[in-house]
Image: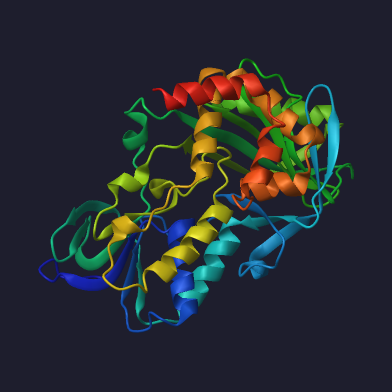
Amino acid sequence: MSMNSSQIKHFDYIFTGTGLASLMTVYKMKQSGKFTDKSILLLDQDSKKSNDRTWCFWEKEESVWKSVISKKWDLALFANENFKRDLALKPYQYNQIRGIDFYDFVFKTLSEYSNITFSNEKVTDINELETHVYVGTEENRYTGNYLFNSIYIKAFAESQTKYPVLQQHFIGWFVKTETAILNPEQATFMDFSVEQKGNTRFMYVLPISTTEALVEYTLFSEKLLPKEEYETEIQSYLNKLGIDQFEILEKEQGSIPMTCYPFWKKNTKRVLNIGTAGGWTKASTGYTFKNSDKKSSELVDFLQSENLKMSAFHKTSRFWFYDLLLLDILYRHNELGSSIFSSLFKNGNPALIFKFLDEETNLIEDLQVILKCPKLPFIKSLFRVLFR
């Protein structure tokens, strides 16, 4: 797509950044059949042609994404240095989607529609005016009635002190082992038996077959580690599982911000921040897929309302407050992560915990989950948060 710089092309909706949130939203706009007369532009400097991430989520019913789920598990394992617990997930299943499969599926569907344009360009400038939004890229200039931005700006959350910011940071190896040693029926949800070193550190294992798995060393903490440290830990964990001979087929790494910072306060009449940039990632776990799935559906409904004002989209719930308490504890006492998650999973009902993490519980159920946690840190945190 090339344009003379003197022409400014206008769209009804512009999406800056085409990650999960944008692609889910546009896909659902298309599925709804309500936006056939609207022009939509998607802008991203990355063409989404590589398998850059893995998303996992649990669900009871089949989702609209069922055709791209590459693996499902009915069982999970939770462990720390003192105990192991096999979790029967029913009525939930734990599902995995590879980034590339999701991108291919959505782009293939969207490419059939002439009112949807994808352009591989780097956004340099976003400017909201009274009647429209102006977007500049390195190559072109565009205007739109409404803009959905998912380009995350680190400085917003990290240059303030009111809301703690942790990172869920990890490196993962997709390995193929020489001997059939893995159990493909059970995902390791969190294994805290690795040395904590004053942090919240665990291994996460997604076995695809008896010889293949994604093994990730994950931390919920403030500072990232040198690359070698993650990889040394993965290596020694594999050895501990009895895996000495293996080949690394793929690697992935990431750092997901975990914060209750109110990104939505930056939403305006015509600009809505979505995805991680809009606070769509669940702050206490870093889980993104399920939250984005729900929010994108809500957004597609919202866009059909009269007198659209983007700043009216966000609603804060009590779950935001629960997340705030947990992050406050982990920020001040990062070493408490293992004991908090362990107390939750040791005796808790896995289906209820998943329902709670999906923010679908009622108040009584909330209490059943929360009261499993160590009381003192949460009481202290409650007072800190209420009286800050």
| Residue 114 vs residue 364, the one in the foreground | 364
Residue 260 lies, with reference to residue 237, above or below; the image says below
Q: State whether residue 247 appears in this view.
A: yes
- Count of marks placed on residues: 0
Quadrant assignment, res 231:
top right
Q: Position of residue 205 (x, y in %)?
A: 74, 41
Horizontal side of residue 36 vs 357, given as left or right: left
What is the residue that sits farthest to the top in this orientation? 198
| Residue at figure coordinates x 81%, y 55% from the top left | 90
| Residue at figure coordinates x 18%, y 54% from the top left | 127
| Residue 303 vs residue 123, the one in the foreground | 303
What is the residue that sits farthest to the left in this orientation? 6
Residue 111 lies, with reference to residue 231, above or below; the image says below
Q: State whether residue 48 appears in this view.
A: no
| Residue 312 vs residue 342, the one in the foreground | 312
Quadrant assignment, res 220:
top right
Quadrant location of the N terminus in the rendered image: bottom left
Q: Position of residue 286 (x, y in %)?
A: 55, 41
| Residue at figure coordinates x 64%, y 57% from the top left | 97
Quadrant location of the C terminus in the rendered image: top left
Quadrant assignment, res 180:
top right
Q: Position of residue 356 (x, y in %)?
A: 65, 46
Residue 235 lies, with reference to residue 61, above or below; the image says above
Q: Position of residue 102 (x, y in %)?
A: 57, 63
Which colour assignment does the render follow?
A: rainbow
What is the residue that sits farthest to the right in this orientation? 180
